[in-house]
């Protein structure tokens, strides 16, 4: 099957996990492989007065950036001697940066022994804080990274540390945004972006989901800023679990503060992390026909349109955001998937929220890899449209 975006072939897959997942429903690796083999490649208010538009992207990101050495004057110009007349020709800082990038890329390609034939679409993803051996570390699940790379993208991991926000513009350009798991979103950040605050748990109830109910303000600030920017620019967005909830409130929707308290116990949506079946637990969802989710899992669903999915959340979507359309829901009515109906991955239009984690179900359904394949195709098409 040949898959192209704006006349440019997509990259070939390179994940053994994806190939294995494909065999679950009888779809071989060749069915998941797009066209030919191609090598790819804390306050934000105010403005510097300069628009950052690296690599020809038309996306401007304004912010107030202060140097740690406020007294030092930053050189804005360097000079290059003309080969023809010996005069000094002004070279702007941005041009100097491009010259350095080209030089270092050539040097690294020589060292590695191969050349970069195409620019890969850059998929931004903010890390999550994790306590390991009594020290905090930043993590992003490797399943996400492997899938993004396997379908032609370059994952750009943004650290969720407190000082990252003032440098966020330097992680641009962004050809796709992946927002995955994380803690409950903080009240302050929700209010800052005009979003509704859900009900909150107190006391012992809050301790039951302590790892989720604790706020991560730095991660919130970074992901909300990037998602708002992506929505404004039309950049592809894949929101998983917390990411789907964030996408919903950013579009004017509301959240269930706690499913057990507000909906009931009919379906178990979150087990304790120490439970042996924490990762193997599944519950059914019904998939709406004619949606991208139905397309991705076409060979996996039961005759009644059902799938069995994992579940790691105690919150969920309550009222769906403006312009979004349902794709799937659990038997208790909790929404499990939605999308913007302007969806067209071939043209770079991709705004999708899934409450479950397809990256952790690759062996269950071939459709799990198809989610990332469509996202990768959209990122590639969006990147080409911005050049």
Image (tube, grey):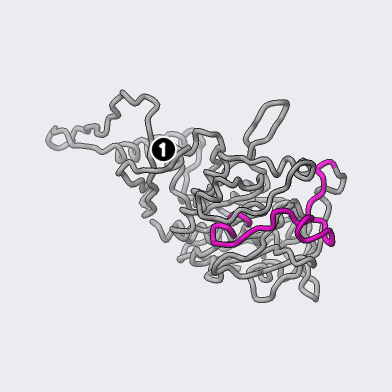
Q: Residue furthest front?
A: 203
Residue drawn at x 41%, y 38% as measured from the top left? 106
Residue 278 percent location from the top left of the image: 82, 48
Horizontal side of 178 relative to 355 (left or right) equals: left
Q: Is residue 369 visible?
A: no
Q: Quadrant of the C terminus?
A: bottom left
Q: Is residue 264 visible?
A: yes
Q: In which quarter of the image is the N terminus?
A: bottom right
Secondary structure mainly formed by the magenta segment: loop
Q: Looking at the image, which is closer to me, 4 or 334?
A: 334
Residue 137 percent location from the top left of the image: 64, 32
Horizontal side of 3 relative to 62 (left or right) equals: right
Is residue 138 on the magenta stretch?
no
- Give, as a single range, the part of the protein colored magenta: 245-274
Q: Which quarter of the figure has residue 334?
A: bottom right
Q: Residues within 10 Å of mark 1 (few under 14, many from 20)?
A: some
Which residue is identified by label 1? 106
Residue drawn at x 80%, y 76% as measured from the top left? 303
Q: Is residue 106 above or below residue 360?
A: above
Q: Which quarter of the figure has residue 73?
A: top left
Residue drawn at x 80%, y 43% as measured from the top left? 273
Q: How many marks?
A: 1
């Amino acid at each position: 099957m040949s898959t192209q975006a704006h006349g440019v072939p997509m990259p070939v897959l390179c994940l053994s996990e994806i190939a294995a997942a494909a065999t679950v429903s009888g779809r071989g690796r060749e069915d998941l492989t797009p066209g030919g083999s191609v090598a790819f490649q804390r306050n934000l208010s105010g403005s510097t007065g300069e628009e950052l538009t690296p690599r020809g992207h038309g996306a401007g990101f304004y912010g107030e950036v202060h140097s740690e050495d406020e007294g030092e004057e930053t050189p804005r110009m360097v000079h290059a001697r003309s080969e023809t007349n010996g005069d000094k020709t002004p070279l702007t800082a941005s041009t100097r940066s491009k010259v350095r990038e080209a030089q270092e890329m050539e040097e690294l390609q020589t060292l590695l022994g191969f050349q970069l034939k195409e620019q890969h679409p850059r998929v931004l993803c903010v890390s999550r804080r994790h306590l390991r051996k009594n020290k905090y570390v930043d993590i992003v699940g490797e399943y996400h990274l492997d899938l993004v790379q396997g379908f032609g993208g370059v994952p750009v991991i943004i650290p969720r540390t407190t000082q990252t926000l003032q440098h966020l513009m330097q992680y641009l350009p962004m050809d796709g945004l992946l927002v995955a798991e994380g803690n409950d979103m903080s009240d302050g950040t929700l209010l800052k972006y005009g979003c509704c605050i859900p009900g909150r748990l107190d006391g012992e109830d809050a301790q039951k989901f302590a790892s989720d109910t604790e706020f991560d303000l730095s991660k919130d600030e970074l992901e909300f800023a990037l998602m708002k920017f992506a929505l404004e620019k039309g950049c592809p967005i894949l929101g998983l679990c917390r990411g789907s909830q964030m996408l919903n409130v950013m579009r004017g929707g509301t959240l269930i503060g706690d499913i057990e308290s507000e909906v009931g116990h009919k379906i178990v949506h979150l087990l304790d992390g120490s439970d042996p079946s924490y990762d193997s637990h599944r519950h059914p969802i019904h998939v709406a026909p004619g949606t991208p989710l139905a397309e991705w899992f076409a060979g996996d669903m039961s005759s009644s349109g059902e799938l069995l999915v994992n579940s790691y959340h105690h919150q969920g979507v309550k009222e769906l955001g403006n312009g979004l359309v349902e794709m799937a829901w659990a038997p208790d009515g909790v929404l499990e998937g939605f999308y913007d109906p302007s969806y067209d991955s071939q043209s770079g239009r991709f705004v999708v929220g899934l409450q479950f984690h397809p990256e952790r179900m690759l062996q269950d359904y071939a459709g799990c890899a198809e989610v990332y394949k469509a996202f990768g195709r959209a990122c590639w098409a969006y990147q080409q449209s911005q050049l």
